[in-house]
Image (cartoon, grey):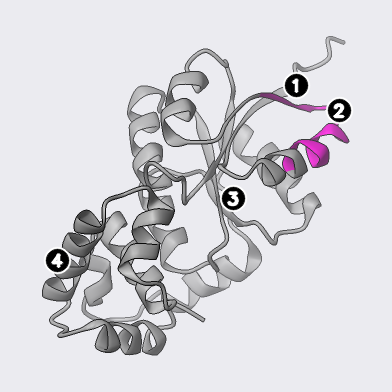
Amino acid sequence: MKEKAPIRVFIADDHAIVREGLKQILADTRDIVVAGEAENAHDAIKLFRASKCKVMLLDISLPDRSGIDVLKQIKKEKPELAVLMLSMHREDEYAIRSLKAGAAGYLTKQSAPHELVIAIRQVAEGLKYISASLAQELANTVGESHETALHETLSDREYQTLVMIASGKTVGAIAEELKLSVKTVSEYRARLLLKMKLKNSAELTHYAIRNQLVQ
């Protein structure tokens, strides 16, 4: 009987130590092989095209573009590619946004190594993967009748800015981390305050804590 070809995986994460850690975990599996990697959105989009990979591990916070923006572009070009989003953020709004944008699954970087392997195998078969905790959170919302929360009206970049401000980061620090100008981040801040009918960063932070968008 012919042995199945290994699952080819592409890793897109701006932290070299994270990429090496993921490669080390997957090196211990016989049916998964890392066939490409990138440290930013530009390279991820460029290199994955020639990688012939079946699964992409995509960091949600790349330095030059939002991971969700990259996800949307990649899914337009290659809708059959299974994309697993990786994030330092807990499983809440980011997970839901990722799944709505076409991700096959969502994992926090604190997930156990065996969970990563299971997730890759599952999405490679065309299935979705979510953790038990996220499944429970989604189940808890079934049947709830409530208006769309204000933060759900934000764009992905506006939402990212909201979370970072609520986490105590200044506009300058956010601009440096996202590789954007201070003016651009300030515009995101102004837009999200307007959309959410808030007056300042203090009210924004209070809203984020009240709605459990930050810990």
Percent coordinates x, y for residue 69 in the rendering: 34, 42
Query: Distance from label 1 to label 4 (Cα)?
Result: 46 Å
**SS at mark 3 in the image:** loop
In-image side of 133 versus 23 (left or right): left
Quick one: label 3, few (<14), some, or many (20+) residues within 10 Å? many
Q: Nearer the viewer, mark 3 or mark 4?
A: 4
Q: Amino acid at mark 3?
A: Tyr
Quick one: label 2, few (<14), some, or many (20+) residues within 10 Å? few
Residue under label 2: 30
Magenta span includes 132: no
- Note whether residue 21 is visible: yes
Residue under label 3: 129
Percent coordinates x, y for residue 192 in the rendering: 19, 69
Q: Earlier in the sequence, mark 2 or mark 3?
A: 2
In-image side of 55 versus 18 (left or right): left
How many discs mark residues in the rendered view? 4
In-image side of 126 versus 198 (left or right): right
Q: Earlier in the sequence, mark 1 or mark 4?
A: 1
Query: Distance from label 1 to label 3 (Cα)?
Result: 19 Å
The image quadrant of residue 57 is top right
The image quadrant of residue 198 is bottom left
**SS at mark 1 in the image:** loop
Proximity of marks 1 and 2: CB atoms separated by less than 8 Å: yes
The image quadrant of residue 190 is bottom left
* 162 and 99: which is toward the camera: 162
**SS at mark 2 in the image:** loop
Percent coordinates x, y for residue 154 in the rendering: 23, 63
User: Magenta stretch?
Assistant: 22-35
Could you tell me which quadrant the N terminus lies in?
top right
Residue under label 4: 191
Q: What is the number of the mark on residue 6? A: 1
